[in-house]
Amino acid sequence: MSPGACHQGRGRQGVTHPPVRGNTGNSSPMGLEVGNPHGFLHIPDFSWPVNTPLCIPGEGHGWELGWGDKGGHRVGNGAAGSSGKPWNGNALELHPGVTICGGVGPPMSGFRGCRREGGDRQEFRGAADAGWARGHEAGGGLCPRHSQVNDFQGILEPLPVQSPRPKLFPAGCTMVEVTVTPQSSLADRPVQIRVRGLSPSQLVTLRAWLKDEQGECFQSRAFFRADGAGEVDPGLHAALGGSYSGVWPMGLLWFLQPDTLFRRLVKRDVAGSPFRVRLEVFDGLSLAPDPKEQPLASCEAERWYVGPGVQRVPIREGRVRGALFLPPGPGPFPGVIDLFGGAGGLIEFRAGLLASRGFAVLALAFFAYDDLPRVLAQLDLEYFEEAVELLLQHPKVRGPGLGVVGVSKGAEVALAMAAFLPQVAATVWINGTAFLHGNPLVYKELRIPPIPYYTERVLFTELGAMDNSAIFADPRDPAYCASAIPVEKIRGKVLFVVGEADRSFNSKLFAELALARMPPESGRILSYPGAGHLIEPPGSPLCSNSSIRGTPRPVAWGGEPQPHARAQEDSWQEILQFLELQLGSVAAMKL
């Protein structure tokens, strides 16, 4: 950087003003103090190596910088200099005879400077002509440089502050920046993460973290080297290590893991707030969180589970309990019932995302919610039939058929609904069974007996979770044929989604047995090696073990992070296309 030239930050465009002269001297270098209205950092010996700039970024805090003694008098060895004049601008650059450059702005006064006399540091409060510059609030940096050959000592001495300290950076005042585009998005949509302003080949750590509604922290980190332009783009550049490796544009979000074992990331307040994900960049290798470590840059992204205008309507009609999600507009929209599994309760995040794609979705609870039974004693198909009729009677729902999406126990229910209820035109079965297990199904005069669970066969994993894959009897045993769901009666279409690393069910076997008994061309299997039991929309990180209601130990769901992430991305698109093909076109919204 040449004398009189100033590297611009992100603030407004700067201009160069006439130099203000002052003698820095050789024996008593100037003192410097940096701060904003909340506090200061003091640099008692304002000295740097030859031609080595230092940058104090604005970061939106309006950092202010002052130097000299009451306008530049008696600086250094005592020689008098002319009074400094205040400028309000982007950056500050100091030379042997001080030069100020920056954007034009009104005079500001009254920030502290310091000097050295006889080895003692004396603080003073400058007047309006104290000679300082204010950083532009939108992010302009303040950049001091001193090029005296013999001035090499610089000591950073913190004073109490209530806001983040400014950070000193080399590399000519370049400001590190991390961005997420778009900043606000639906949780199943991709975003672009980019870091700029690094040194070429600089090793950095990118960290993502969020807290769920219970205050549990989920985080990921990945290590990168910047390219020749000083940038990192996880969609182009391979992560060297961390929570994942390789090129994964969404890796920092897809590979989030809980700080506390056996926690599952589930959005509960779907319509009221997003997940707020914090992205941070650290210099070098940051292997674990350190409260004392300050990021080079950070930003926040919002991940929503409902799009703009999606309406959530609590449902408590007849026996039916749940929440209806309606897209914006008059409709009518294709209807879908969304079911989860053996933990019970009401889970809504998938329904919100489906509604954001143009479907009218009823997130349906069937036990352990509101006044429904606390435990699942039997599957009463008439309850689900009542829910189907309720949804199809809504003026914004397009009939005559609807879709059902279910995972785990919910997939078992969805397959039974497809077999017995003619209104079900499309069924998405995710890692379920094709037989009744543990609970009988009753429908009018019909009762289908269950295959019992053989819980004595449960295995404990190395983490102490329960691997339930062995507690299911072989469904091909002729003794259990009466427990089979009569899939041969299905009139609609079925999409089977299978995780081959499912440690809860032998889902692939159940899907194959069901498909073999179904009418030709009525079903299709999507099978994913390495994917676990909880295949969810993309953006939901793999949950391979978690605690659930009603079990004495956490449950092992299985899955490997990278294959599971690919399965979620691919299967979600397949599910959306399948539902639209079978139920009719939809108008998805943007966020």
Image (cartoon, helix red, strand yellow):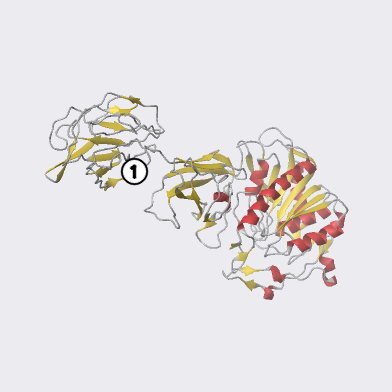
Q: Quadrant of residue 5?
A: top left
User: Residue 211: horizontal and vertical position, in percent?
Assistant: 50, 51
Three-letter code, disc 1: Leu
Dividing the picture into quarters, in which one does residue 329 lie?
Answer: top right
Q: Is residue 256 above or below residue 506?
A: above
On screen, residue 183 versus residue 511, left or right, reads: left
Q: Residue at x 73, y 69 (%)?
A: 472
Residue matched to label 1: 168
Residue closer to the observer: 532 or 132: 132
Q: Which residue appears farthest toward the bottom when viewing the image?
A: 456
How many marks can you see?
1
Relative to residue 185, is residue 444 depicted above or below?
below
Q: Please name the residue shown 85% across and 71% down the image.
A: 478
The relative height of residue 51 versus residue 221 in the rendered view (above or below) is above
Q: Residue at x 27, y 26 (%)?
A: 107
Could you tell me which quadrant the N terminus lies in?
Answer: top left
Which quadrant, please, contains the C terminus?
top right
Q: Give x and y (percent) for residue 493.
A: 82, 49
Q: Give the answer, above or below, for where 180 lies relative to 548.
A: above
Q: Quadrant of residue 410?
A: bottom right
Q: Is residue 158 left or right of residue 216?
A: left
Q: Position of residue 412 (x, y in %)?
A: 75, 59
